[in-house]
Amino acid sequence: MTDDTLSDARIRALASTDDDLRRLLNGDWIRYRTSPALQELSWEAHAVCAEITATYYRSPEHARRLFHDLIPGAGADIDFRPPISIDYGMRLVIGDRTFINADFLVIGGGQVTIGADCLIGPRCAIYTPNHAEDASRRQDGWELPLAVTLGDNVWLGGSVTLTPGVTVGENSIVGAGSVVTRDIPPNVVAAGNPCRVIRPLRESETPPPAP
């Protein structure tokens, strides 16, 4: 039995006794604060993140193994720099050869899909939960996790924030410090708060000569 199979079996077992975990997996409203399973899973994920951060420079291979154990959907040849903070590794998919710089943050249980060959700048954050707008429901702890998607070959500059439900199309570049509140199409440069398309990508650039 593989680690992924064991993880899936554990999630199914937890979901059989926890309504909020079942609702999360079905894309429905949840209450994290009243869910033993969601709290258990997120606490465990943060403990693994802390161990990755603590051991990365002493034992990078061990840290990489922990990273892939935490994120079963992580592809091959992913490079990252600690610290990282991820609420639910099971809800994250990362494509091959993606690079993730320091202070990467993923909040909430919405499905997050990062394509192959992406460049994630330092201090980038992905927020997936929307809390209830109705004051009484918000006080009761209701939130709706929404999916966030990055296409292949996306470049996020430093300190980019992605809000719940957004998609950034393949090849696009999001400028440093941007707050993405709406979908960004493929093959553009976008920036700002809120983030807006500035121009299409240049069709060709001449790289500097080799030293």
Image: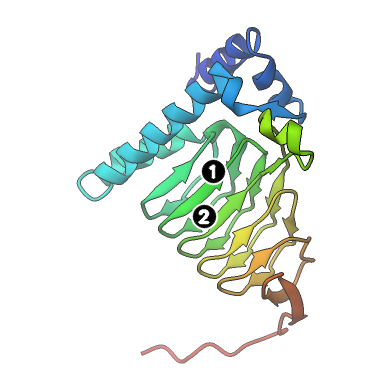
Image quarter of residue 163: bottom right
The amino acid pointed to by label 2 is Arg
Residue denoted by label 1: 75
Residue 37 horizontal/vertical position (percent): 55, 18
Task: Determine which of the numbered discs, if any, sits on residue 173 in the image.
Answer: none
The amino acid pointed to by label 1 is Gly
Q: Residue at x 59, y 52 (%)?
A: 126
Residue 105 horizontal/vertical position (percent): 50, 50
Q: Residue at x 20, y 46 (%)?
A: 58
154 up-or-down from 131: above or below:
below
Residue 26 horizontal/vertical position (percent): 76, 25
Image quarter of residue 49: top left
Residue 21 falls left or right of residue 71: right
Residue denoted by label 2: 97
Disc 2 packing (10 Å; few <14; some 14–19; many ≥20): some
Which residue appears farthest toward the left when viewing the image?
Answer: 58
Q: CB atoms at circles 2 and 1 under 8 Å apart?
A: yes
78 up-or-down from 120: above or below:
above
Q: Say what secondary structure mark 1 lies in.
A: loop
Along the line of sight, the residue nearer the viewer: 142 or 96: 142
Residue 39 horizontal/vertical position (percent): 51, 24
Image quarter of residue 112: top right
Disc 1 packing (10 Å; few <14; some 14–19; many ≥20): some
Q: Residue at x 68, y 28 (%)?
A: 140
Residue 43 falls left or right of residue 182: left
Location of the C terminus by quadrant is bottom left
149 up-or-down from 193: above or below:
above
Residue 109 falls left or right of residue 87: right
* Cα distance in 3D space between marks 2 and 1: 8 Å
Q: Residue at x 54, y 14 (%)?
A: 10
Q: Say what secondary structure mark 2 lies in.
A: loop
